[in-house]
Amino acid sequence: MQFFPFHVKTQYMDVLPFFVSLIAALVLIPQFRKLALRAGLVDHPDARKQHETPVPPIGGLVIFPVFIIVSLLSGLESGSAADLFVALLVLMIMGAVDDQRPLNAWGKFFIQFAVAVLVVVAGGVQLHTLGNLFGLGPLEMGWMSAPFTVVALVLLINAVNLMDGVDGLAGGQGLIVLLWLGGAALLRGTLPLLMPILPLIGAMAGFLAYNLRYPSHPRASVFLGDAGSLCLGLCMGWFCISLSQVPSDIIEPIGVAWLLSLPIMDACAQFYRRVKEGRHPFSPDRGHFHHHFLDAGFSSGQTSMLILALVAIFGAVGVIGPLVLPLPVLTFTWSALLLTHIAMSRDPTLYVGVLRNIRKRVDKS
């Protein structure tokens, strides 16, 4: 952590980026919120949204500059970090513009594809192997490594963006994934690999203080915004890929699939349903996983907590599962969940009916 202008013991220095990012987010978000309200930079309520008053979508415009600056000051050592930071800046600009004046879907897709190529080709962050998925030996990607990783990153960027529909959901999901990655580093005794994640964990935790619902904070006062959800998807992908490949290699690739289960499954199901209906795969509607909970009668707060609990459980499977279960078992179980989710999502009323019955049983108990 050589670039911090402080002289403190190493153990304190190691966690300093977390606290700097946390405090910076806690202090800066209210100030940016005031500026956004004065300038009219707000997300207005509509039929697809849960908030009742205009809310500034400026969370990402604080989180990711804080992450970049603190990472640079703390001396993040990675040859691909510069490409990641450039990609984040591009996504922040595009997202900020899109929040105020919706951009063409194909134009946004092209920009997402371009930043993914930058990170994968120039930055060298690629899925070279998918691990021993089927028990027949490591599945090496070979020449497919770069194109497969680009497609996977674009899918994840959009998946996280599309799940950002309930207070605390996308941000909470991102924080849980990052914490499980940190847990994987601790479990394998590779503490230095945890260090680059700490600034983003701190910034996300600071943001969630204003975005989650809890007794003294009944509704979100700021949103991630498109800038935030797009950048979060890219960062989640970047860290997951980096830490699942040599030389880091602290989590199995199938473990990454489990960590990112809900956004991946939700995006695949929605893309399939929309294309089948003859619509653009990125067209908005109320068919997402969180919409099923809301339509079944769960409150926004309950919806977030229940889905985040699933994210935490799937994360535990992804990090701890490979230590105790054969990888093919994890592969086939994950694939079965994906296909089941896609099948049920073809008719959203089916999902809503199942969840409504669950809610009624819980209410009676």
Image: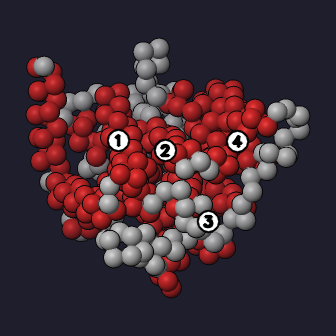
Calculate the distance from the C-alpha at mark 4 to the C-alpha at mark 3.
27 Å
**Where does the image place residue 323, in percent across and percent down from the top left?**
40, 53
Q: Nearer the viewer, residue 283 or 270?
A: 270
**Where does the image place residue 279, in percent across and percent down from the top left?**
28, 65
Circle 1: residue type: Ile
Circle 3: residue type: Pro
Q: Secondary structure at mark 3?
A: loop
Nearer the N terminus, badge 4 or badge 2? 4
Residue that badge 1 annotates? 313
Circle 2: residue type: Trp
Q: Nearer the viewer, residue 304 or 189?
A: 189
Residue positioned 35% across, 31% down in the render? 305
Nearer the N terminus, badge 1 or badge 2? 2
Nearer the N terminus, badge 2 or badge 3? 2
Q: Is residue 291 above or below residue 158?
A: above
Mark 3 closeness class: few <14, some 14–19, many ≥20 residues within 10 Å? few
Residue 292, by quadrant, is top left
Marks 3 and 1 in Cβ contact (< 8 Å): no
Image check: 272 left or right of 18? left
Residue that badge 3 annotates? 247
Q: Nearer the viewer, residue 331 or 101?
A: 331
Marks 4 and 3 in Cβ contact (< 8 Å): no
Q: Residue furthest top?
A: 216
Q: Nearer the viewer, mark 1 or mark 4?
A: 1
Residue positioned 66% across, 69% down in the render? 123
Q: Secondary structure at mark 4?
A: helix
Mark 4 closeness class: few <14, some 14–19, many ≥20 residues within 10 Å? many
Residue that badge 2 annotates? 180
Q: Nearer the viewer, mark 4 or mark 2?
A: 2
